[in-house]
Structures are given as C-alpha cells and as structure tokens.
Image: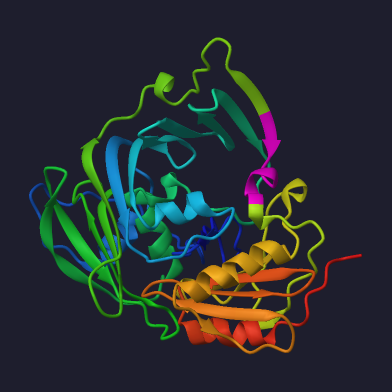
Amino acid sequence: MAVWRDVAAQRFSRRWLLVAAGAAGLVAAGAVPWPAGAVDVDATALRRRILGSVPPHVGYAESTGRLGLPQIPQLESAITLFTSTTRIRAFVAGSDRWRVDQLTPAGERDTYRLDGVEYVWDFGGDQLTRVVGEAPIRLPRAADLLPPELARRLLRLAPADPVTTLPARRVAGRTAVGLRLTPSDPATTIGTVDIWADPATALPLRVEVAPHTGPPLLTSELLEVDDRTPDPSELTPAVPPGAATVSTSAADVSGALRQLDAPPPPAQLAGRSRMPLSGTPDARLPGVGIYGTGLAAFALIPATADLAGRVVDNAAVAGGTTVEVPSGRAVRLATPLVSVAARTSRRSGVLLIGTVVPELLEQAVRELPARRRRA
C-alpha cells in the first residue's frame, strides 16, 4: 500500500503506502494561462503551473489499478484501490476546502476537508465522523487517486527529475497538454509518470503511472469536469435525521498501522536514512518509519505476529521469494510497480512496502534487528 505525504521543505507528514506521495515542497510560480487554443507548451512550465494553486472544479473520475498485489489482512480496502476500478466524484474549492465521494454499488463514502478539519460520511453505517488530529502516515483513499491530487503528489516527489512534452490528447471533452516525468533514481520501480492537463487552468485531467517496461498499471482520468466553484452546501456534510455523529482520533482510523507497543524504528535501513515524521501528538504511530526520499522511498510498518505471518503466507502463495533471516520467517514479493516484504517472529512482525526494487526491501528486512514488543 502506500503512504501519502503532505510535506514542505523535506518534512514528511501524512504519507501513503504504495505509490508513495508528497515529498520536498516545491515553491511554484503563480499560474499564468496559456493563450486560448495553444497546445504546444514547455514541460517545465507545465509542471510549475500544475504545482501552483488548485483551480476550483467539480467532476467525476475513474481510477483503475492493476498492480497485482496480494490481499493483506486489515488493509483490504486500501489494496482494492490499486487492484480495481474506483469511481470518484469531486467538489473542490481549494486545497483546504473540498469533498470527495467514493461511489460503490452499495452506496458511497464521502470525505470532507473544511479549513483544516476532516469529516467522513459513511452511507452504509449512517454515521458522520469528525477526524481529530493529524497522523504522521495514513492509508490511501479515493481522494488521493483523483488526477489533480495524484499528479501533484507524484511531481512533488521528484522536483528535479526531467520532464518532457507529450502530444496533446482529448480528455473530458477537452484538448489536454501533456508532460512525462522520468524518475532518475534507479532504485524506483516507476518508469514514467504521464500527466495531461487543461492548458488554460493547468488542472490535471489524466495521469498514467507505468513501470520500466510494459503499459501503465495505474490510470486515473476525469471523465467529466466543470470549472466552477462548488456551492457551500456541496462542501458541508448533511447529516440525515437519526444518523450518528462521532469524533475520533486520526490515530484510531489508522487501523493496522497502529501498534502501541512497537519498538522505535531503526535510524537507517538498506543505506537509507529514516526521514522525520510530523503529525499531532495525539495521533502518533509508534514504530513506523519512512526511509529514503522521492519515488524510491519505502515504509516500515510494525505489525502483530499474526498479521505479519498471514502476509508472509499470502506472499509466498503469490510467488514471493523466501528471505533467510536469523530468526522467524521472511518473504519479499515483487510486482512491476510495488514491492512488499514481511517478517514475522513469535512475538511480533513488520511490513515493508514501497515503489522500490525488491532487492532493496530484501536487504532492509535482513538488516532489521529482532523486533521485540515494548515491555
């Protein structure tokens, strides 16, 4: 899975497991529209404009993932985002005022961001949850896969990597201009990131993420889009009579990422230093670590012995490679875009995941000390 990171100046705060996101902050120049009808643009200028202010919009998107990941206990909903098609409706007024609905056959799950506070409306559970605090990492959600958000996060990961111009294409009934980001770090499994954006607003309309060989394995596209500011009523949670309203800590919604008795993560793994994590004190996640930067970063997540053991078993069935370790059992699994490793012992376990070559995670899992629970 992945860890999304909303960051500034090499500070990693909210992260994502899987196609990792957010990284060194990039100060973008103010957006200046291209002349009407222009489609031949400079790729560097397009990147700068995409990373500028978020233009208001309302739209419908679909994201399709074919990452070939095995099922990981307690992380099924996140895995599904990258192994199937996700239908998404978006209402965006700005970077801190938006609503994103994940549409399913059974209903929908709506996430609201209003001036620094998040709310989640669960149609099936008939409940509105106010999320308190900021966790240093979190599982991915549908909002992360919207083309504008996905494009910005991936571009922030590699601010110095080269970009080139792509031919224009029709997206959502518009002629969109394109750029291709080619990561320069040989340790990442990502070969190219292709982005097409509206030439007038620089709003990303389509994103394709491909490995070094083969077709894109993650595609997200706005099929319908309207350049309007959402009405305030569209950005305000409407709680039906009889529905429950609760508050919970951001740490509590982290689920399997939270192991209260986990030991501190090592300062370094596989030649990568552990990056600083932020978040509010009430939402800390003990034992979690992010190693490396950019598109070649990976996450260490403490787990129970039972959960890690099931991941080891599932990965082995899916064609994983056994890793010899001094104690316990370990395995690593390679997919074209994401690598996973797991180690389990009698008392505890650990998961490693990232868009990095599998050999890097194998080295990391070998270097891990015996991980004992805190007394």
Tally of marks: 0
Residue 84 or residue 119, whichever sits in front: 84
At x 51%, y 13%, the residue is 240
At x 66%, y 80%, the residue is 329
Image location (x, y in percent) of residue 134? 65, 47
Q: Residue furthest top?
A: 241
Q: Residue furthest left?
A: 37
Query: In the image, is residue 137 above or below residue 68?
Result: above
Magenta-colored span: 247-255
Residue 317 or residue 98, whichever sits in front: 317
Q: Is residue 261 left or right of residue 72?
A: right
Colour scheme of the picture: rainbow
The quarter in which the C terminus is drawn is: bottom right
Image location (x, y in percent) of residue 97? 47, 34
Res 167 visible: yes
Magenta highlight on residue 108: no
At x 55%, y 34%, the residue is 115
- Quadrant of the rendered structure where residue 185 is? bottom left
